[in-house]
Amino acid sequence: MTLIITAFLVGWTGFVQEGMQLYDTFWDSFEDYIFKPFFWIMVIGILPALLVGMLFGKWIKKAAQINN
């Protein structure tokens, strides 16, 4: 969820600040500032996020079993 929310918010920030220029169309700016960053963050970032999530999940589960 962190990847999705971050990609979405960062994309919209760039879109509002720089993408809405007179020489750009809405769809070109949408693609450049929202779709492309979101796509690449999800493609490249999903694997490390899943790996770290699984490792931390196992670590927390192990720590909880030790404390019981």
Image (cartoon, grey):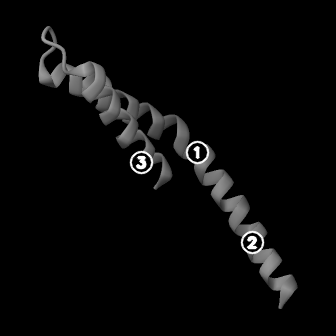
User: Which label sits on residue 17?
Assistant: none
Residue that mark 3 sits on: 4
Query: SS class of the residue under badge 1?
Result: helix
Query: SS class of the residue under badge 3?
Result: helix
Horizontal and vertical percent for residue 28? Answer: 19, 19
Return the residue found at the far top: 23
Q: Which residue is drawn at 67% across and 53% down?
A: 52
Q: Residue at x 22, y 28 (%)?
A: 30
Q: What amino acid is found at the position of numbered circle 2 in the picture?
A: Ile
Q: In this view, does 4 lie above or below 16?
A: below
Horizontal and vertical percent for residue 12? Answer: 30, 35
Which of the 4 quarters of the picture holds residue 26?
Answer: top left
Separation (CA) of disc 1 from disc 3: 13 Å
Q: Is residue 21 above or below residue 37?
A: above
Circle nearer the viewer, 2 or 1: 2
Q: Do the residues labelled 3 and 2 touch (CB within 8 Å)?
A: no
Residue that mark 2 sits on: 60
Tell me which numbered mark, 2 or 1, is placed earlier along the sequence.
Answer: 1
Q: Residue at x 59, y 53 (%)?
A: 50
Q: Residue 9 or 31: which is nearer the viewer?
A: 9
Q: In this view, does 54 lie to the left or right of 64?
A: left
Q: In this view, does 36 lie to the left or right of 51?
A: left
Tell me which numbered mark, 1 or 3, is placed earlier along the sequence.
Answer: 3
Q: Residue 51 or 20: which is nearer the viewer?
A: 20
Residue that mark 1 sits on: 47
